[in-house]
Structure formats: structure tokens, C-alpha cells
Amino acid sequence: MLGDPNVYDGLKILLAALGEAVTEKSLDEFERFLKKLHTKKSESAKPENEEARILSLALLKLQRGGTYPQIAVVGMVSAGKSTLVNTLFGLPIAETKITPDTTKGVLSVGYQSGLTIYDTPGIFGDDKYPYHNITRLFLSLSEDSDYPRPMAIPLQTVQYGHSQPSDVDQIALDNIKKYAPITNVLWVVNASRTLTGPEKKLLRTFFKELEAQYKGRLVVAGTHLDTLNDKPLDERKEMLQQWSEVSNGQLIPISSVTGEGLDQLVRVLFASLPDHTPLSKLQESLIGARKLNRLSFVLVEISRMLASIMLLDGTQIETIQVTLIEMFILICDHYGVDQDTWQRYSGDAIRIGREVQSIGANKARKLRDPKGFWERLRFVFGAKFFDTVTEFHALGVDGLKELLPMVYLTIYDFERSSQAAFSKEDIQKLVEVHVMPLIQDHDEGRLTIIINRLLISLFETL
Ligand SMILES: Nc1nc2c(ncn2[C@@H]2O[C@H](COP(=O)(O)OP(=O)(O)OP(=O)(O)O)[C@@H](O)[C@H]2O)c(=O)[nH]1
Ligand SMILES: [Mg+2]
């Protein structure tokens, strides 16, 4: 039973959850603890209660928060959508692939992690093509009068662990959002295909429609990079250029056959996912196929957290503190084991927590020592950031200049890349050059990508 809530109760629970299996019971206990803190808040605003509350919020967010990503894959007929879904995510039915021939309805592929991928029929067949509007309506885009009108959307489900797909359900058009909510869209194009003038126009319009509906949650993959690589450099450049133009510079060239470019695609996809996606779970679905390493995973997640902090201003101190704790925990947990163990547990921080045993263990333990946790956190993320930037400024570039070197040094301390550590001043200069205009745009998606690139360039080993 919990007594009066104080900072040590919060810490004990936090550390228990980090080091051991998190059971429903411990989460229930934790929620009771949190409730108590909230009701106590008005009568007792003792600083140590405040600290415990913030720690608790951080843990709760880590354990329970989040919508799972529901990614719709769209593109022209035969662009390589189904093949990419198979390569990137793997398919939960043993030995079976999503039909490489034309996809005729929406196929919903559900993973144990909570991730759902929707494979959709190709768009822009000839004008009798019966599936074009199925995909458009599935994406909540307006119907295209040049193509036949569907009466319903055929939706078939494949669940992890089940060897057979369900029967095809015909979902009424009005109901489709309820059956299949979409958080992100992956637009797949065949980058080795030459576009005619009218096609370019059509696709540019299509991209704009997608962007209006899924801004910041839209990723563009250009398949068949392997075929392109066989062509002369000029021709290759020209091909990529035409596709880059119709997708406003967002094209990521990949090959589903050789795997080239897929890491980059996964990174950008991560960065576009909804705010509270439990990424360690999502990663479980991806890591087997993509073999993302620990460093790149941590960088992607940290970049997103940094971007969300930078677009706040110093008055939202509680959200900032919660996010800093998340970052801190994320770094400690992912470096709690060696890379092999990390791979074996698919980067799942909670399961790794149970197995902490080798290289990072001592360090992680030291960093998690409850005594002076708060001071340590201030030290890790920079006293100046805590004391000055958060209180008196909109965080923007100033905040990032303070925070990024600390984040880099903390990760570096665990990772010890072959690169010599950068100085705080070097990193601050990089931030000024690369980030200034983006913060003014207030565009979290792009900011995330830029921070990620900055961190990746600092860690050359990636
Ligand atoms: N060389 C190469 N071939 C690819 C690549 N991606 C897909 N393909 C091939 O392109 C063809 C079409 O791929 P699909 O995955 O069926 O395309 P789709 O977009 O699902 O097609 P629809 O469902 O008909 O709209 C298949 O023969 C694939 O093997 C790639 O990156 N490189
Ligand atoms: Mg297909």
C-alpha cells in the first residue's frame, strides 16, 4: 500500500518499472499513486511532491500513452506497394506474401505490436479502372468522376498469428473511418518510370490533395532504385528529379529488392508518426526486417522529442520536464545492454530492463541512482537549459543550442563512436546554421528530420 505520496514513492515505482517487468498490477498501483498526487496537489504544493508528480507523468506516458500507427500505403498501379509492404514490415501469415498481382480491395495487416498497415489498390489505371475511387475514398479524398463509383469498400483483414486472412467485408463508404482510421500515408511511386506531361500534372495535384489531408504525416517512397542504378548517371538523376518535383522534394529513393534506402525510409517514417506512438513497440515490427541499430533508433526518437520541446515556450515547463525524463530513460534503457541483446529483444526497453547485464549496466545504474536524480537530470540536460532557457524564452533555437550538445554528449558517453566528441560550441554553430529557418516555420515534422540529420552527422558510425 502506498503511504503519503512523496518523491521516493515516485522514484521507487519508476525504477522498479525500469528494472523489472511491468505488470498490470504495478501499473494500477502507479495510477493510484498518480491520482493521489493530483488530489493532493492543491493542499500540498511541496516541491518534492511536484517532482514526484512529474516523474510519474513521464513514466505513465512511457508505459501507457499512445495511439498505434495506422499506415495506409498508396500509389499508382504496379508502383510496388505490395512488395514494399512485404519487404518493410514482413507479413504475419507464414510463407505468404501479399498478392504481387493487382490489389483489388484494402488489405489491413495487423501486427502484434499494434501497428496496422493498409495495402490499397493502385490509383490511376485507365479510365475504366474500377479500383481508383476505392483508394481515394478510403483516404478521405473526394471521388474522381472520371472513374467508376464504388458502392462499398472491400476490406480484408490479416492478423498477426493467424494463418488465414478474414473474409472480405464490404464496408459502407460512410463507415470507413470507423473501421480503418489512418494516421499516416506512405505514397509509393515507381521511380524508374518516365512520366508524361499530363501524368506529372495529375500526380502533382494528387500530392497536394494528400498533403492537405495528411500534412506532416505523409512520406514518399520511390521504388525500383535497383533498376535505376543500371542506368547512366544523367538519366538516373533526371528520373529522380521528375519524381522529386511531383512530390515537392520529399522523395526517398529505395529498392524493395536490394534493401537500399530502406533505413532512411524507416527513419523518416518514424519521424512522421503520431506524437504518442509507443515506438519501442512499433520497432518490434520493423527491426527484424530492417535491422535498425540501437543508435539510429535512439536518435530518431530523441529527435522527435527535441523537436516537440523546441516548439513549446518556456512556460510549459511541466511538459518539457516530462519529455526530458523520457529522453533520459530512453537513453539509459537502450544502452542498458549490448547491441546483440538489444537486437534480440527488438529494442523493447521494458524487456531489456529485465535483462540489464553488460556494457551499459553500471553506467545506467549510476545515472538512475535516486539520490540527486533531479540534480543529475539538470546536469545531463544542462543547468542553463533548466534554469534560464526554459523560464525566460520561447525555446526555439536558443533551447536547441543548449540542449543538443548535452543530448549528444550523453548518448556519446554510452555509444563511444569512433568519432571524437564534438565541443558544445561546434554543435551550437551547426544548430544556428541548420535549424533557424525551420523553427520560424513551426513545422515539427521537418524540424524532427533536421535534428535527426544533425545528430546522425555527429555520430558518423551510423
Ligand atoms: N526491380 C524492382 N522491382 C520491384 C520493386 N518493387 C516492386 N517491384 C516489382 O514491381 C511489380 C509490381 O509490384 P507490386 O508490389 O505488385 O505493385 P503494386 O503497387 O502493389 O500493384 P497494384 O496492387 O497492382 O497496384 C512486381 O513485379 C514487383 O516484383 C523494386 O524496388 N525493384
Ligand atoms: Mg498491390
Image: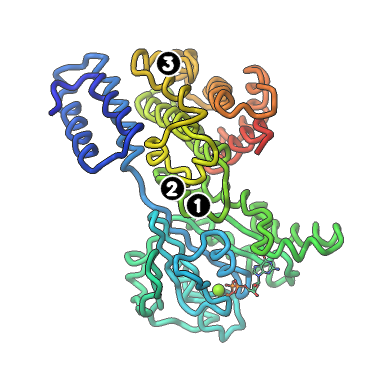
Among the 4 quarters of the image, the one containing residue 236 = bottom right
Closer-to-camera residue (422/340): 340
**Residue that carries the numbered disc 1 in the rendered image:** 217
- Calculate the distance from the C-alpha at mark 1 to the C-alpha at mark 2: 8 Å
Residue 29 appears in which quarter of the rendering? top left
Image quarter in which the N terminus is found: top left
- The numbered mark, 2 or 3, whose residue comes first in the sequence reads 2
Query: Reading the chain from its start, which is encountered first: label 3 or label 1?
Result: 1
User: Closer to the N terminus: mark 1 or mark 2?
Assistant: 1
Cα gap from disc 3 to disc 1, whole angstroms: 36 Å
Q: How many marks?
A: 3
Which quadrant of the view contains residue 256?
Answer: bottom right
Q: Residue at x 16, y 28 (%)?
A: 36
Percent x, y of residue 341: 49, 41
Q: Which residue is mark 2?
A: 274
Look at the picture and state if 6 lies above or below 207. Answer: above
Provide residue 457's location: percent of width, then percent of height. Answer: 67, 34
Q: Give x and y (percent) for residue 428.
A: 63, 21
Question: Given the image, on which type of amino acid does mark 2 rest?
Answer: Pro
